[in-house]
Image (cartoon, helix red, strand yellow):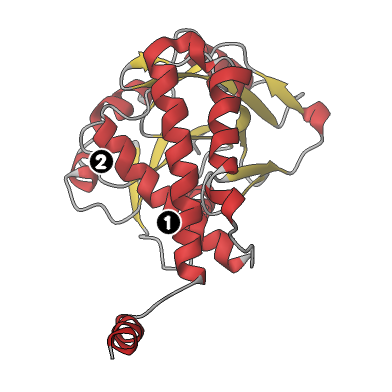
C-alpha cells in the first residue's frame, strides 16, 4: 500500500452528532483521516472506528497544562500524508474546494495554502462582524506545521511567504447548532483565557471588566459591520461583551481569592 498523500486531521471531543457527516464529507478527498480524541464520553470513538480503514483514532486527552495546540501538534505527528489538512469536525469542504485541494498537492511551487471560511452560527450565515476575515494556512506539507497558544490556537508554517498559496473556494464552518452549545464552549474558552491572564501576571482592573468588553462588542457590531447580519449580529456582539467580561472576572477571582474560612472570620469580627 502506497503512503497517503493527503491526510485530514481533526481534534474531537463528544462529537457524535457531527462526526459521521464530517467523515462522509472528507472521505473521497482524503487518503487518511486522523481523529485526535480529547477524552470523548459519547459515541465519538465508536463512530470513528467503524468508519473504515481510512480513519484512524488516537486517544490523547489533554493534560491539565495542555491546550488545543498540543492536540493539533499531536495530530501533525500522527498523520502520515505528505500534505496535512487540519480542520475541525464542524467544517465541510464547500463546492469547488475539494477539487482545488486535490490539485494543490501536485503544485511544487507551494508548501502551504491559506483558505477562507464561510461561517455559520445557529445555522445562520455570518458574513460580517469579522467572521469573514479568517484566512489561515491550515493546509500544508507535513513537517512544516507548528501550533502555538492553548486557546484559539495559531499555526506557524516553516516556509517563506512566497511559498504559501491562496485557495479561492471557502471551507464551510458550521459552528454551534444551539446557543446552549455556544455557552458551553464559551465557558471552556473563558476558563482557559483566565488562566492565561493569571499566568502572565496581568492584573485585572476595572477597565478590563467594563471598557474592554464594550470595545470588543462595538468593534464587531459597528466597526466590522456585524449589524449587517441582523439579529444574529446583535446576538454575537452581546455574546462578545459577556465572554470578554467573564474571562476577566474569572481571572480577577483567581487573583483575589477569599476562602470560606476567611469569610466567616470577617463576618464574625463585624458582629462581635
Provide residue 73's location: percent of width, then percent of height. 54, 52
Give the secondary structure at mark 2.
helix
- Residue at screen point 35% across, 14% down: 124
Labels 1 and 2 touching (C-beta < 8 A) = no
Neighbor class of circle 1 (other Cα within 10 Å; few <14, some 14-19, many 20+) is some
Residue 133 visible in the picture: yes
- The image quadrant where one finds the C terminus is bottom left
- The image quadrant where one finds the N terminus is top left
- Residue at screen point 60% across, 26% down: 219
- Residue at screen point 61% across, 49% down: 207
Q: Which residue is mark 2?
A: 48
Mark 1–mark 2 distance (CA, rounded to whole Å) = 29 Å
- Furthest residue toward front: 272
Give the secondary structure at mark 1.
helix
Q: Tell which of 160 and 262 is nearer to you.
A: 262
Question: Looking at the image, is mark 1 or mark 2 earlier in the sequence?
Answer: 2
- 207 left or right of 121? right
Residue 30 visible in the picture: no
Number of disc labels: 2
Q: Which residue is mark 1?
A: 191
- 2 left or right of 22? right
Which mark identifies residue 127?
none
Q: Tell which of 259 and 198 is nearer to you.
A: 259
Q: Tell which of 263 and 76 is nearer to you.
A: 263
- 168 left or right of 87? right
Task: Locate residue 34: give its quadrant.
Answer: top left
Amino acid at each position: 500500500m502506497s503512503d497517503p498523500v493527503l491526510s485530514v486531521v481533526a481534534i474531537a471531543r463528544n462529537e457524535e452528532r457531527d462526526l459521521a457527516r464530517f467523515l462522509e464529507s472528507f472521505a473521497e478527498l482524503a487518503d487518511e483521516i486522523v481523529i485526535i480524541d480529547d477524552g470523548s464520553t459519547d459515541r465519538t470513538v465508536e463512530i470513528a472506528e467503524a468508519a473504515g480503514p481510512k480513519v484512524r483514532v488516537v486517544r490523547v486527552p489533554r493534560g491539565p497544562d495542555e491546550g488545543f495546540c498540543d492536540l493539533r501538534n499531536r495530530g501533525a505527528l500522527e498523520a502520515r500524508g505528505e500534505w496535512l489538512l487540519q480542520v475541525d469536525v464542524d467544517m465541510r469542504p464547500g463546492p469547488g474546494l475539494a477539487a482545488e485541494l486535490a490539485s494543490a498537492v501536485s503544485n511544487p511551487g507551494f508548501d502551504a495554502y491559506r483558505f477562507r471560511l464561510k461561517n455559520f452560527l445557529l445555522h445562520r450565515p455570518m458574513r460580517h462582524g469579522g467572521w469573514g476575515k479568517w484566512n489561515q494556512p491550515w493546509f500544508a506539507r507535513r513537517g512544516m506545521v507548528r501550533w502555538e497558544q492553548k486557546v484559539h490556537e495559531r499555526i506557524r508554517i516553516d516556509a517563506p511567504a512566497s511559498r504559501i498559496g491562496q485557495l479561492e473556494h471557502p471551507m464551510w464552518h458550521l459552528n454551534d447548532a444551539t446557543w446552549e452549545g455556544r455557552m458551553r464552549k464559551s465557558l471552556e474558552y473563558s476558563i482557559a483565557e483566565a488562566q492565561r491572564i493569571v499566568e502572565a501576571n496581568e492584573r485585572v482592573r476595572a477597565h478590563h471588566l467594563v471598557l474592554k468588553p464594550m470595545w470588543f462588542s462595538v468593534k464587531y457590531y459597528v466597526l466590522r459591520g456585524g449589524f449587517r447580519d441582523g439579529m444574529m449580529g446583535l446576538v454575537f456582539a452581546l455574546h462578545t461583551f459577556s465572554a470578554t467580561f467573564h474571562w476577566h472576572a474569572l481571572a480577577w477571582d483567581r487573583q483575589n481569592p477569599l476562602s470560606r474560612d476567611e469569610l466567616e472570620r470577617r463576618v464574625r469580627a463585624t458582629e462581635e
